Image (cartoon, rainbow, N blue to C red):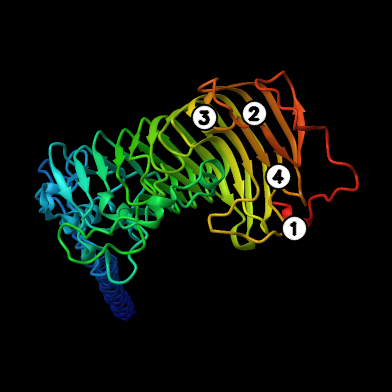
Amino acid sequence: MDGFCFRSLTFILFIAFLVWSSSFDTCIARRGKHRSQTSGSLFKKKSQARSHNSHHSKGSQPKPPPSTAPSPTPSPKPPKEDAPPIPPQQGSATFNVLDFGAKGDGKSDDTKAFQAAWASACIVEASMMLVPAEYVFLVGPISFSGPYCKQNIVFQLDGTIVAPTNSNAWGAGRGLLQWLEFTKLVGITIRGKGTIDGSGSVWWQDEPFGDPGDDETKLIVPLNNTVAEHPPIPITSEFSSQKMPSIKPTALRIYGSFNATVTGIRIQNSPQCHLKFDDCIGVGVHDISISSPGDSPNTDGIHLQNSKDVLIHTSDLACGDDCVSIQTGCTNVYVHNVNCGPGHGISIGSLGKDNTKACVSNITVRDVTMHNTMTGVRIKTWQGGSGSVQGVLFSNIQVSETQVPIMIDQYYCDKGSCKNQTSAVALSGINYERIRGTYTVKPIHLACSDALPCMDVSLTTIELKPLQEQYHMYNPYCWQTFGELKTPTVPPIDCLQIGKPSNNRPHQSDQNMC
């Protein structure tokens, strides 16, 4: 019995040992399998992380680990092939034309050097293109513009720029309209103590003598018929046997630009207009000098067209045509503290040529001196035009030896004769105050349209005396001019019709609305 119990107990223990051994092996196997799965997952995650980082930082260096050593400077990216190369910006980003091959000896053609300097300056914000002092640069026609130009570029003119007198430089055929042109720029400033010389004499002497291109000369003094019958023979240029082209260029033109400033420089002897602004908004001109002979044809000082918010002041303007010419599309123009003479005075117009519509408004001209000018302040329009001139003030104008100080001419014609037409540019709100000095032909000439009389013309403190009292002078002339004499005038202006036209007179039509 005891033996049987012992054998039974041994058998039970043996079975228990087998069960325990089997459980231990299973546990070891499971633990090993878990370790294998964990190691595989970690390796897979690390591999995915490396692949992810490699994808997002392709072509660049990974971030270095924290270190006290300085990191290397990355290499700059090369510019695109379709964009101009960006030059290194050193200091004030000044681009001297001498560094681009200009000679500055007054004989070598420096046109390409100017073009290259501008190409570099125009792609750098607030850069400066420098034309240095004590050099004379012979430069042909240039357009300073480009699709890559940045804002607020300064054209620093301290030297002298001279136009070529070789007819070949101005292109084949009739010629070019501009010499130096700045186009579609924002914040362009042209400044300095230098000179722009248009070499105009070779162009003017091709112009027949006695053809002033301004009808008022025929109104005031007869032409010298003897001289006109025998005009001087057109001369040839210094470097060419050909005549200069028939189209004479403007010396300096700024077109389609915002916030354009011209200051300090001198412009002289332009073939035609000296300084012209077309389609500009925000114009500032001050402390400049314009100079050409009084008999140089069509050499306006400053010409404005389709421009607004214009300020011109503190300048000396001497030329062969209008010191300041204000054309169609101009509004908010303020001219003050300007010396004018010789020249044709300060003019609005001519307007409405070839039955066109002209709109001019809010013009102020004040604190101006004029000496030896053909007219003082005037408005000139063609018959057949439409549109309006309104809101004009001429104030504190001092004239001396001026042929006709105050003029409105709505019968303007620069040809031998012009046919009468009923439509006209409407004039209203024209104010003259404190205009004093001496005249040589007629104090006032106000010739307004039969169809659309001038309205709301006011005159205050007008004191105009003939230069030589002993000679008979023309009396004030008025035609279809309505308005008000706010003070007594010298001489008396009895021809002005006080008030407004009668109700049966024609009024402005839709064509005259601006």
Tell me how far mark 4 sits from mark 2, CA to CA: 16 Å
Residue 72 visible in this rendered orientation of the protein: no
Nearer to me, 343 or 118? 343
Residue at image mark 1: 422
Residue at (73, 53) in percent of width and height: 512
Residue at image mark 3: 440
Label 2 Cα crowd, 10 Å radius (few <14 / some 14-19 / many 20+):
many
Residue at (25, 39) in percent of width and height: 195
Please tell me which of labels 4 and 2 falls first in the chain.
2
In the picture, measured across the screen, residue 136 lies left or right of residue 18, that is left
Give residue 315's position: percent from left, percent from top: 39, 30
Residue at image mark 2: 432
**Dot in front, 4 or 2:** 4
Label 4 Cα crowd, 10 Å radius (few <14 / some 14-19 / many 20+):
many
Give residue 346's position: percent from left, percent from top: 51, 37
Is the C-beta separation of discs 1 and 4 under 8 Å? no
Please tell me which of labels 3 and 1 falls first in the chain.
1
Quadrant position of residue 378: top right
In the picture, measured across the screen, residue 212 lies left or right of residue 505, that is left
Residue at image mark 4: 448
Quadrant position of residue 499: top right
Say which amino acid is labelled 2.
Tyr
Tell me how far mark 1 sits from mark 4, CA to CA: 12 Å
Residue at (62, 56) in percent of width and height: 352
Label 1 Cα crowd, 10 Å radius (few <14 / some 14-19 / many 20+):
few
Task: Give the vertical position of 502 relative to 205 (above or below).
Answer: above
Say which amino acid is labelled 1.
Thr
In the picture, measured across the screen, residue 99 lies left or right of residue 89, that is left
Please tell me which of labels 1 and 2 falls first in the chain.
1
